[in-house]
Each structure stands twice: as C-alpha cells, then as structure tokens.
Image (cartoon, rainbow, N blue to C red):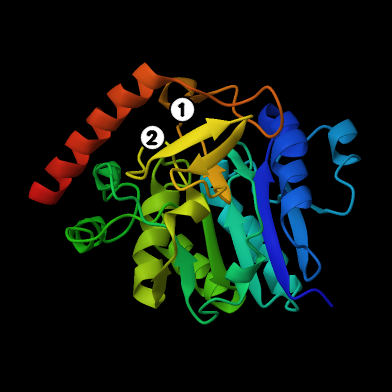
C-alpha cells in the first residue's frame, strides 16, 4: 500500500507542460516507490489523459465553482477523505514546476507538521483579501504583519492536517473566484496548525530568491554547483515569469535578465513596504 501522494490539478491550457515537463521530470528524478501521483482533471483532453502512465486521474467535481487555484484544495480533500491510506500529501502547481532531483525524503521530515518554503521577498498579497472575499479579513491580514508568506506552489502536509485546513479554509471563504484566497487562507491556517520551514531549494523561485544560481545545459544549479531539486517559474502572466522556454530537458531555460531585474526590484519594494506598514 502506498503511503504518500503527490498531487496537482491542471486544465487543457497547461496539459502539454504537465505531461512532458512536470510529470516526466517527476518520474525521472523522484523516488516514487512509496508514492502515488494524482492528477486532478480540470478539463484535460482525452488524448493527454491516456499518456500519464502510472498516475491516478481524478475528475474534479468543483471545476465550475471557482478558480482552480482555490478549488484544487477541495478536489484533493474529496480524494483524501475517500482514500485514507495516504499518510502524507504534497500539493503542488502543475504548470510551472520541474523536479531535478529526489524530494521523497520530505515526506518523512517532521511528519506531524506542514512543510514548505517561505518567500524572503514577499509581496503584499494580503491587500487582495477583503471582507467580501473571506470572513475575518482584518484579523487575518493583521496576523501576517511579522511573517513571511509560505509559497503554496509546493507544500507537504500530513493528510489529516490537510483535510482539517481545507475544511476551515472553505468555512472562511466567501468568494471562490477571488484571486489570492489560495495563498492567504492556507498560509494563515498552516501557521496556526504548525509549520516547519524547509530549504528554499525545494521550491526555488528565480525571481524572488536571494540565492545565486546558474543554468547549464538547461539544468538549474545553486552557486555551489548543487542541482536545485524543485524549480518554480512562478508568475500569473508570462511577463512575470523570469525564465523563458521553461521546461525539462535540452533546449529549455533561458534567463530573462532584464525582466528578472525589474521584477526583483519591484517585489523588494513591495516587500519593504509590507514590513513597514
């Protein structure tokens, strides 16, 4: 019986990346001997779904209720409540992440706590949250005055804790279409439940990381020559993504140096203002 689960949600827009970069890099670099892979289907084409050899495909029951960023939590909640054999679960983005080395040991690290990476350059995401979007918005925003945000693009949870967090998350959610709910509410509830910060290389965001890195033969390395386990080319729009032709394998990954410099300066300014408020 498999003990662990790596889950993501995806629609047709990002299905090519999901199959040929996210899933391929996961299978080639991560020890999955005790781990199942769950693809939550938000409208994948039938042809693509046939190609995820070895993965579990789970059709979303919530894809018409709001944003995928928000409702993927409820999808995974549905799956876990019907599959209690999984002790730990990693929920991660599927359209902008690649795996470059093994991360399976994270499932046994501090297993009673939620594990993730905080953003040292952290934009003021709390301004997105209002009383029309979530309950107790003022209290939640105030909670983050002295805290770095956890990037929810890759987080490892004890499954029972994930279920509890999701139940509370949707008790507080008023607008399932609201951008930012998937960041602020999980952050608030993760900190409340018990959080263990892991090394930033397990959710490495080139734009906002303060660590130096380089790219050689399409592979990302830290300055000391270590391969970065998880690279996350984060950004809501293409302009906000600092890596061009992002992907896994030869011919990918070129740094957009000007864009990265501009975005980093912008995010550092927002981060400074956030801490001064």
Residue 270 vs 103, above or below: the answer is above
Q: Residue sitting at 75 percent across and 72 percent down? A: 82
Which residue is nearer to you in this view: 93 or 248?
248
C-alpha span from label 1 to label 2: 8 Å
Toward the top, the furthest residue is 258
Let me know if residue 277 appears in the view: no
Residue 248 vs 76, above or below: the answer is above
Instruction: Check the picture and name the quadrant holding the N terminus.
Output: bottom right
Horizontal and vertical percent position of residue 12: 72, 30
Q: Dot 2 corresponds to which residue?
A: 207
Tag 2 secondary structure: loop
Q: Residue sitting at 83 percent across and 53 percent down? A: 55
> Which one is in front in this view, the residue at disc 1 or the one at disc 2?
2
Task: Give residue 115's mark.
Answer: none
Horizontal and vertical percent position of residue 258: 35, 17
Image marks 1 and 2: residues in contact by CB distance under 8 Å: yes
Task: Give residue 241's mark.
Answer: 1
Tag 1 secondary structure: loop
Indicate which disc, 1 or 2, sits on the residue closer to the N terminus.
Answer: 2
Q: Residue sitting at 51 percent across and 74 percent down? A: 164
Residue 115 vs residue 65: left or right? left
Q: Residues within 10 Å of mark 2 (few under 14, many from 20)?
A: many
């Amino acid at each position: 019986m498999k003990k662990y689960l790596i889950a993501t949600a995806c629609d047709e827009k990002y299905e090519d990346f999901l199959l040929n970069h996210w899933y391929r890099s996961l299978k080639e670099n991560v020890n999955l001997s005790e781990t199942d892979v769950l693809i939550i289907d938000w409208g994948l084409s039938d042809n693509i779904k046939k190609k995820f050899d070895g993965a579990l495909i789970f059709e979303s029951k919530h894809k018409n209720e709001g944003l995928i960023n928000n409702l993927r939590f409820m999808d995974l909640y549905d799956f876990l409540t019907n599959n209690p054999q999984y002790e730990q679960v990693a929920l991660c983005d599927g359209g902008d992440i690649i795996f470059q080395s093994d991360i399976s040991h994270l499932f046994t690290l501090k297993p009673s706590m939620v594990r993730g990476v905080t953003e040292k350059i952290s934009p003021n995401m709390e301004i997105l949250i209002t009383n029309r979007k979530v309950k107790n918005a003022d209290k939640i925003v105030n909670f983050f005055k002295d805290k770095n945000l956890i990037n929810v693009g890759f987080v490892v949870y004890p499954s029972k804790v994930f279920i509890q967090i999701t139940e509370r998350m949707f008790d507080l959610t008023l607008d399932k279409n609201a951008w930012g709910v998937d960041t602020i509410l999980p952050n608030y509830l993760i900190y409340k439940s018990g959080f263990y910060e892991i090394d930033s290389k397990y959710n490495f965001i080139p734009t906002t990381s303060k660590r130096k890195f380089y790219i050689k033969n399409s592979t990302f390395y830290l300055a000391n020559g270590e391969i970065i386990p998880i690279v996350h080319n984060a950004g809501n729009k293409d302009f906000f993504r600092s890596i061009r032709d992002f992907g896994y394998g030869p011919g990918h990954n070129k740094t957009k140096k000007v864009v990265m410099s501009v975005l980093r300066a912008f995010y550092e300014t927002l981060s400074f203002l956030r801490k001064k408020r």
